[in-house]
Amino acid sequence: MRRILLTCFAFVFFLTFGLVSRANAADGYHVEVNLKGVKDSMAYLAHYYGKPLPTIYKLDSARFDKNGRAVFQGKDYTLGGIYMVLLSDKKTYFEFLLDNGDKITINGDVKELPNGLKFKNSRQNDLFAGYVKFLSDYGAKQQALQEQLSKAKTAADSDAIKQKSITLSKEMVNYRHDYVKANPNTLLADIFNALELPTVPEGPHYMADGKTIDSNFAYDYYKAHYWDNFNFNDDRLINTPIYDNRLEEYINKLTLPYEDSVEKESVMLLEKTRGKKELFKYTLWWLTRNAETSKIMGMDAVFVYLVENYYMKGDAYWLSNDDLQKYIDRAHKIAPNVIGNIAPDINMPDINNNYHKLSDVKAKYTILIFWSPDCGHCQTEIPKLDSVYNAVLKQKGTKVYAVRTEGEEKKWQETITKDNIGDWINVYDPEHKSRFREDYDVYSTPTIYLLDEKKIIRGKRIDHTNIASLIEMLERKEKAEKTKK
């Protein structure tokens, strides 16, 4: 049995199918598969959901009989897209287009996959078979060129081979363009269009003065036209492996990593998908997860924004009440300490029972750190942070307000002495009266914030490696703003 594994060329095979919608057909599907070389074994009907392999979602199962025949059928509405029949080894599969109401017969030989398939009652899958043949030839030619490139002995030879590869790639693009012209308003046409990336016009390109070269033209043009050919009205595109990669590039590579920029682009995408059930669902889920898990400082504010403006307003229709509440609770924990907010005040005693209020600390910058003498990471981070503080930050008018979260008082005092951090404002909450864990989302230690002179949060979840550069960036920004005035 031939196993079809994902390779660098395999991705194009995911994008190879199309059919005309059958608006008058009954809901559901009926797919009969006759596959030579397979018998007495299970198979699964699966589809993509936004992502490429290995992520697939199983819809149905059937068993091949002794004659190699299996039938998949369902009566409920079925959203169209790229589907596959996955054999029992979970590695061998073939793909085709399925839409609601389709009744298709597929004949083939497992040894010839993904080629050699014959379709009955599916004109667009007949066209797909021709496209698969084209792709097989294309892949073989590109592989041969790569082998030639690895053996090239001169720069001229390498350039000539690369030019052949470019020419071959243009043939692929032309194939897709020709298909779209001949078969508009089909799923495969929408897939080809969704794959289409902007081609930046050749320059030079000038600024408004007609003399200065516009160095941002390529970026601005590419970003502005990124979604031009993506059909946000076709929900079936969610059952393809395209959308996740497009979102990843647009949000994480083309959009400036600032809260307001990401929020603006998120709203744009959600408005484009609003009204399309599955595209909207995936878009909101993806944007929320991306913001929540991002390591870029400030993206937690995007998470809060999405929860407050979409989840809490009833747009996350697929969530149970319990799951929805988890999002809301998480947003409530983050909201008080997002970058740009005034830091919630803290008033705690030191070891001598002298109280120190965070808002009373007079400093250009305040490092607010939550730590424990029992925390292994803290034992490493605290001395390194103190070294940066003494070497760079103290001269900039920085002070440290350090909150002991837990641990024995004696060990706390010993650590202060051992690490020579007695000039920090070292406080704790002996009677557990404060809300520092809730106010600052302290679920692990150390947790470090940077506050400015007005106690506005300028950085969070930072460490000794980036705090100095963050302060330098803030000072440059402050200087630039003063210059403008």
Image: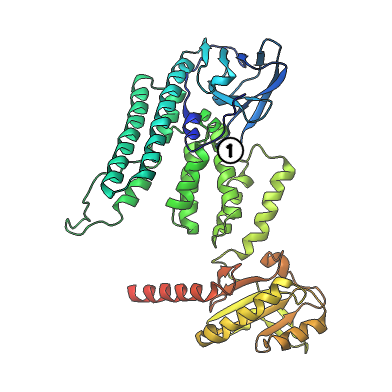
Q: Is residue 263 visible?
A: yes
| Amino acid type of the residue that numbered disc 1 sits on in the rendered structure | Lys
Up the image or down, 278 lies above or below 75; here it is: below
Question: If the image is split into quadrants, where does the C terminus sit?
Answer: bottom left
Look at 47% across and 38% down and name the residue there. 272
User: Which image quadrant is residue 355 in?
Assistant: bottom right
- Please provide percent x and percent y for residue 227: 41, 40
Counting other residues with Cα less than 10 Å from the Cα at mark 1, is it few (<14), some (14-19), or many (20 or more)?
Answer: some
Report which residue position mark 1 lands on. Answer: 281
User: Which image quadrant is residue 419 in?
Assistant: bottom right
Of residues 246 and 288, the one nearer the viewer is 246
Look at 56% across and 14% down and name the residue there. 106
Is 236 displayed left or right of 173 in the figure? right
Q: Is residue 485 visible?
A: no
Is 477 displayed left or right of 211 in the figure? right
User: Which image quadrant is residue 179 in?
Assistant: top left
- Please provide percent x and percent y for residue 32: 62, 12
Look at 46% across and 44% down and name the residue there. 268
Colour pattern of the rendering: rainbow
Question: If the image is split into quadrants, where does the N terminus sit?
Answer: top right
Is 119 displayed left or right of 175 in the figure? right
Up the image or down, 124 lies above or below 443; here it is: above
Of residues 62 and 183, the one nearer the viewer is 62
Is 265 displayed left or right of 382 in the figure? left
Q: Helix or strand or loop: what does disc 1 sit on? A: helix
| Number of numbered discs visible in the structure rendering | 1
- Please provide percent x and percent y for residue 48: 58, 32
- Please provide percent x and percent y for residue 150: 39, 45
Up the image or down, 148 lies above or below 397; here it is: above
Look at 51% across and 14% down and name the residue there. 22
